Structures are given as C-alpha cells and as structure tokens.
Amino acid sequence: MLTLETEPDPSVFSQIDFTNGAVAAVSGGSDSTALLLLLKDHLDRTAPATKLLAVTIDHGLRPGSAAEAQAVARLCVGRGIAHRTVVWSRRKPSTGLPAAAREARYRLLAEAAQAEGIGLVLTGHTADDQAETVLMRKAREDGARQDGRGLAGMAPATLYDWRIWIARPLLGTRRAALREVLQRANVGWVEDPTNEDEAFERPRIRAALADRNGTQRVEDAVALAARVAVEREQLGHRAAALIRGFASRPTAGLIRLDPGFATAGDEAAAVYALRILLATVGGVAFLPDQVRSKALLDRLRAGPSGTTPFFATPFCATLSRTVVDARRAGIFLRRETRNLPPAAPAVDNALWDGRWRITLDDEPGAFLIAPLGAARAAKRPIADDGTPPSLVRAALAAEPVLWRPDELLGECLGSAQDSQVLPGMAVCPVVAPFARFLPSFDLAPAGTVAALIGAPLLPATPFSGHTAS
Ligand SMILES: Nc1ncnc2c1ncn2[C@@H]1O[C@H](COP(=O)(O)OP(=O)(O)OP(=O)(O)O)[C@@H](O)[C@H]1O
C-alpha cells in the first residue's frame, strides 16, 4: 500500500539534477515556503554552489499581494537566498481569470528562469493538491467520454514551452507535514482566502477531504494517480513504437501511415498514436475525442481482406483539423485548409496555427507569416517518390511562408518548412498537444513525434541520469 510522507523526506530532491541551478516558485503560502526552506537545506548540504533563485509572482489580484511578495523577499534576505518579485502587469481578462493567472504565472516563472540561464522551476504542489486534482478530474470524467489518462494527476515534472522543466518534488508529501516544518522553524505563511472559498470546486474538495476519512481518501486518490501514471507511460511507449514503425513524413505538413498501422494488433496504442498525430498535424493543443478516434481507426482497419486494408474504396475524414486520406498509397494526414490564419505580422514566441513556434530577434512586424496557399503550392516542383502529388500540394498549401510587409504580393522570401531559420527569425514545427505543457508521462510519444516532424530535440529531464528519449 502506498504511504504518504507525514515527515518531509530529505531525499525528495536527491533525484533532481541541479547542475544548471533552480528557480523556487514561492507564493508565500505554506507549501512553497516549506519547499524553499527544504530545498535550501538540501543544497547547502549537497551542492552549496548551486544557483538558487526564489521567484514570487505578484498577480495584483488581491489588495495584500505586494506585501505578501515583500514578506517572501524578507525571508529570503534572512536566509541568504536570491529573490525576485515579478508583477503580472498585462491587462486581466474579464472571464477565465484563474486560468489566465495560471498561464501568466508559468510564463513569468519560465521567463525569470531563462533570464538567469536556469532550466528548472520547482513548485510546492503536495500530495493534498494531487488528491484534489485527481478527485476533481474523476468527478468530471464520470459520465463524460474521457480516456481516463487525466487521472494520472500532476506529473512529477512538466516541460513548459519545450524549454523549461517544472518539477514537483513534494507530490508525495502531505501539507500538514510541511506546515510542521515551518512551525518548528518559526516561519509564518500566508493563507490565500480563495483556498477557503467554497464557491470554487477545489476548496469544496479540500473541505471534503478534511473530514475524518480524509487521510484514507487522499491516499486512495494518490495511489490511483500512481497506477494510472504507470499505465499512461506504458501506453505512450507502445504508441511511440507504432509511430516509429509505421509513420513517415513525405513532405512538410504531410504524415504517411503505412496501412499496417491500423492492423498492428495493439488497438489502445494505435488509437493513442493516432490521437497524438491528429492533434499534431492539426495544430490542436488537446487530443481529439477518444471515441471518435477509435471509430476512425476502425474505419481504417476495415479493409476488404479483413486483415490488410488497401482501401479499395478510398475515403477521407476530418478530425482535429486534420484531413485523413486513406488510399492505396497509404493513410495520409494533413492540416485541413479551412480556418488557416490570415497573413499577420510574426510575433515572438507565438505558436503559428498551433503548429509552428516563431522566435524573433528582430522587432515584431519585420516579417509577415501566411499560408502558402493552393495557387502557389500548385507551382512548386514535386519529388516523384510515390506520394500522390495532389496530397503533397494540398499539404504544402497549408504550410507557412514568410514575407516582408512591403513585398506581400511580390516574391516569396522563403518557405518556413524544415525549421528554416531566416536572419532574425527561427520557425520550428511543434508537437502541438505538448507544445506548452508536456507532462513527463508522455515523453516517449512526444519525443518520437518530434523526431518525425523535425521539431527540436527534447531537453534532458531534470531527474539525474534520465534522458528525454
Ligand atoms: N504567486 C505565486 N508566485 C510564485 N509561485 C507560485 C505562486 N502561486 C503558486 N505558485 C507555485 O505553484 C504551486 C501551486 O500553487 P497553487 O496550488 O496555488 O497553484 P495552482 O494554480 O493550483 O497550481 P497549478 O495551476 O500548477 O495546478 C505553489 O506551491 C508554488 O510553488
């Protein structure tokens, strides 16, 4: 049976590679304040030269938020820890504020880390947070057509923007244990009133877990997460093997699956692989519906011979903004041409159509980015490699090209295909469902799809001795 740490385990940090330093994300609440003290103690004992920076994001959403950040800064001064407060100064949305604040928080934490040449951010998520997350997702999944992979909860590490690792070393530690650490050290913390506001789902679940069966329910939820995480990782490895065995990329924007993909025998892995590929080709941040994806696989499998489909009757289907074209030459996936972004100035670190990451050194506006379009794609020379030319052209038409603003109707500066870097600008394909947040559970399929489409290699994981591949 799984037991949760009621005393913080000093070894929670021992698997983490601190070679390139760490940012501790410290809100001033109990969990992240304890994280900071435990981390500082660990580094003092094991690697005192490690660069450690505590960062507090002041969302400016509550009257006391600046004072709370100052309290963290004072604690850091007293302990010899570098600290920065970063203010979320952009305009706040009128709806979806918690999600926007979360998005901003991760962006600002990642920027603060990157500015210091640090590739790792640590957060203070606890076993209590994990249990709440799993129970909230379970409540949502019951009755909905979900695949259950969300029940793996929060991953021990998540790659943000394909560049900064967010690690959660306290996921196996109870909040009460962290508070005891603070009480023993005579260090106070801030109570966020929104954590108590039962108008929100998480505080309601938190309150429900505070009753006398709470400990058991937290342990059960965390144990469920651990089981599902193992299953999800295993499924990911099997999906990655199918992609390696059956998928190729005849040209930019076009993925070919060998028909054997549909009949390879591991149906769950094939559906998972198909969902990841559909989302990637379509530039969609979430995987398409499990049931519809399974129905599509069934259709791909229904070849006339029963075992080896050769699509005597070719068919086309669209899912996740991706056209699936099954014919004698193979199963082809490409971005549908509907709803492509119109020509617009390239913006730094933006995801163009969810499929390409743009990085600009120049001032914004130096380039425009637009789909190539059918007319120009029709004039492109096509290699004779057995791929139907009509499919190559259809795929190319949805690929981005770059223009100088004053030459929009003139000469095309160059296709952005194949991670082409123009002066002052880099354009790289992304694995869309994992481009912003890649949970460590999904490293295997993400890395395999990255290799398939020519996306940048994954950085090594923050766990010592583990590579991302
Ligand atoms: N204002 C902040 N400044 C710095 N770090 C923060 C801030 N708010 C939260 N964090 C970090 O995130 C962790 C989780 O905080 P909290 O549970 O409040 O956020 P959350 O919104 O539930 O997180 P997530 O969105 O990742 O699930 C904290 O332990 C801390 O490390």
Image (spheres, rainbow, N blue to C red):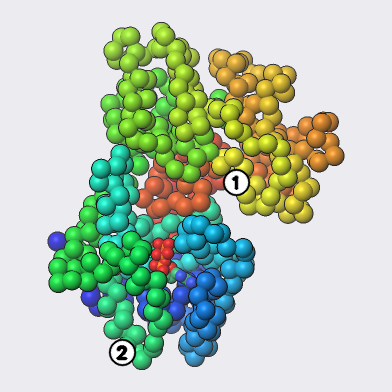
Inspect the image, locate mark 2, and give the three-letter code of the amino acid beneath it. Arg
Q: Earlier in the sequence, mark 2 or mark 1?
A: 2
Q: Residues within 10 Å of mark 1 (few under 14, many from 20)?
A: many
Question: What residue lies at 46% left-to-right and 75% top-to-bottom?
Answer: 27
User: Residue 280: in sight, yes or no?
Assistant: yes
Pointer 1 residue: 351
Ligand 1 within 8 Å of the CB at mark 2: no
Q: Position of residue 432 (x, y in %)?
A: 51, 42
341 over 388 or under it: above or below: below
Viewer-nearest of discs 2 and 1: 1
Pointer 2 residue: 184
Q: CA distance from mark 2 to mark 1?
A: 47 Å
Q: Which mark is residue 378?
A: none
Q: Position of residue 453 (x, y in %)?
A: 54, 36
Query: Which quarter of the rendering shows the N terminus?
Result: bottom left
Q: Are marks 2 and 1 in contact (CB under 8 Å)?
A: no
Residue 331, picture quadrant: top left
Q: Position of residue 299 (x, y in %)?
A: 35, 20
Q: Residues within 10 Å of mark 2 (few under 14, many from 20)?
A: few
State the SS at label 1: strand
Is residue 51 found left or right of 143 in the rendered image?
right
Is residue 76 found left or right of 367 in the rendered image?
left
**Along the viewing direction, whichever of 390 and 92 lies nearer the viewer:** 92
Q: Position of residue 158 (x, y in %)?
A: 43, 56
State the SS at label 2: helix
Question: What residue lies at 28% left-to-right and 47% top-to-bottom?
Answer: 141
